[in-house]
Structures are given as structure tokens and as C-alpha cells.
Image (tube, coloured by chain):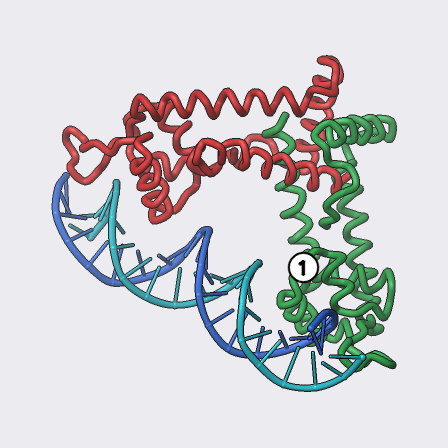
Chain colours: A red, B green, C blue, D cyan
Amino acid sequence: MGFTLSQLGFAISSRFGQVVGALGLEPRHFAVLRAVGAADGQSQQAVAEWLQIPPSTMVSLVDHLEKQGLLQRRPHSTDRRTRQLHLTGRGAQVLGEAIKLSNEMEQQICAGLSSAERDKLLALLGRVAATIGLSKDAARP
Amino acid sequence: MGFTLSQLGFAISSRFGQVVGALGLEPRHFAVLRAVGAADGQSQQAVAEWLQIPPSTMVSLVDHLEKQGLLQRRPHSTDRRTRQLHLTGRGAQVLGEAIKLSNEMEQQICAGLSSAERDKLLALLGRVAATIGLSKDAARP
DNA sequence: TATTGTTATACTCTATAACTATA
DNA sequence: TATAGTTATAGAGTATAACAATA
């Protein structure tokens, strides 16, 4: 069971990496994009803290996204130290693409299961997650 | 589903890392130890190829295990280029420990499930694995 | 000439800590 | 003095390719 879960998890997350990779993103870039999309105008630090990414790494991620024209750093209205992050139009579009591709991948994963089986599987996985003490921690895409 | 599986797989493999870490091993060291235990006297290259580890990395893994007294390089009887890998007594003991701890971890993972549920879960996971084309490839611990 | 194991090197990734500009 | 963001730097990990011994 441990081996199977670990193997499946690895396969799925690397497949996810390939999927968003087709859009020129790594999973972490997608995570940043999604966080900004969820609440436009957050500071770099707020997003970094939310995603548990060290500030120096955050800089390079935002650099990358800004260079691709998906994200913009804008000055904060009152605090000139902070930069507010905003999706560009293209950023919103790419984020939508990525979410769409994720959903397609989700459907592919569940393609061999009936909806009752899918629910059953999710329930059993939830039980395992609870058993090993993994419930509401660790938000990683 | 994709997120859940990826999260669970990650949690389980890092927990496994902690478990074997208590014996001074990393998962890859355990994999080498287990491969040698399964067929004593294999060449470094044979094990490296089996585990999909590049030769140069294999050297450092075997160095580490030899330094810990768990493994021995011995000359091949006819081909003086190759080194045969053998478990030491302590190596066999530590391997046994590691396997025992793995089994305990397996039981912990399944602790919240009845045996029928465990079978059901394994079957459903097998269906998902088959759906995404993951069956007999990729032997990673 | 090909192969086994080794070493050297270069590369990527990441985090720590110094630095700047503001507060 | 403390904080947001940046840059510089050092460390681990890994793979590529040169190398030595042997086949």
C-alpha cells in the first residue's frame, strides 16, 4: 500500500509537471499564479508565506512570471517597500488554461472509475490520510 | 483526486525516509541494500542498472554503505574489473531492521481500514494506475 | 576496441545571510 | 529598530564526461 501510494503520487505529480510545463510553467509558478488569481494585489511576502516559499526563491519565481508577461509588480499605494502582485490579462488567460488542463487530467485519472467508485476511493484515501495525521496541513499543488 | 494522491504519496515517501533515516540510511541506500540482499554477489553495474542509478552515483552510495560496514566490495573471480557486492552480517541485520520498520509503517498506514477495505482500496488504486498507464514500470522504493 | 569502476567537473536547485530602501 | 524585497553566496545533490584498469 505504501509503495503503491507513493508510486502513484509521484507519477501523478510528475505528470502534472508535464501538463503545466506545456504552458511554460513549473508547478510552483502555477501555484503562485493561482494564489495571485485568488486574491489579486497581495504582497510578494504574503504569497510567499502562504506557499511556504522562502523570499529569495519567491523573487526568482515572480521574475520568471513577470518576464513571461503573466504577472505584474506594482507599487503599494502607501508602503513603498512592498510590491503588489497582479495578474495580467495574459496571466489570467494562462491560469485559466492551466486550470482547464488540470481538470482534464483529473478526469483522465478518474476515467476508469464510476462516480460511486471515485467517491469510495476518495473516502478511503481520506481515511488513510487521517490515520497518518495528514488532514489540513501542507498545501502543495 | 490528483491532489489527494500526490499529497498522500509525498507524505508517505517522506515518512519512509524518516523511518529508514533512523537507521542511518536514505531510501536509495535501502534500495541498494535490498537489491544486494535479494541476490548476493551482483556487480555494481548490475545493481545500478536495475535501480536506474547512474554509475557515478552508485559509487558514492556503495562507498557510504561500505563505510558503515553494511556492504563489501569483493573482487570478481575471473573479471578483475568488476566488484561483487555482498552484505555483511551487520548489513543483513540492518536490512532486516529496515524491512521490519517498513512493515510496521505499512500496518500504520492501513490501521484505519478493515482488511476488506484495504483490498478494495488497493484494487481501486490499481485501476487508477492502469488507467494512467502505470503498471509494471518504474521500480522505485 | 569495449567495458567496469572511479574521479573530476559542471550544473541545478535551494536556502542563508548580507544589503537597500523604506517604515 | 524592524520589515519588504533583492542580491550574493555557499551547500547539497546530481549528472556528464574524462580516466585507469582490464577484457
Q: Chain of mark 1?
A: B
Q: Quadrant of the N terminus of chain A?
A: top right
Residue D4 is situated, as x and y percent measured from the top left of the image, at 26, 40
Residue that appears at 58% across and 21% down: A104
Q: Residues within 10 Å of mark 1 (few under 14, many from 20)?
A: some
Foreground pick, A45 / B42: B42
Q: Is residue B123 above or below residue B71?
A: above
Q: Quadrant of residue B136?
A: top right
Q: Is residue B21 visible?
A: no
Residue bearing the label numbered 1: B53
Tell which residue pokes out farthest to the top in this image: A115
The answer to whether residue A53 shows anywhere in this view is yes
The quarter of the picture where residue B30 lies is: bottom right
On screen, residue A3 versus residue A138, left or right, reads right
Q: Is D23 situated left or right of A66 in this image?
A: right
Q: Position of residue A95 (x, y in %)?
A: 42, 24
Residue B94 at x, y percent in the picture: 79, 65
Residue A62: image location, x then y, percent: 33, 39
Is B59 above or below relative to B20? below
Front residue (pair B71, B45): B45
Q: Is residue D2 left or right of residue A116?
A: left
> Which of the pair C7/B69 is nearer the observer?
C7
Residue found at x 70% / y 70%: B62
Instruction: Identify whether B88 is placed above or below B11.
Output: below
> Label 1's element?
loop
Q: Count the labels in the image.
A: 1
Is residue B35 shown above or below A48? below
Amino acid bearing label 1: Ile
Question: Residue B75 vs residue D19: left or right?
Answer: right
Residue at the spot 67% in from the left edge and 43% down from the top edge: B12
Q: Residue at x 77, y 58 (%)?
A: B98
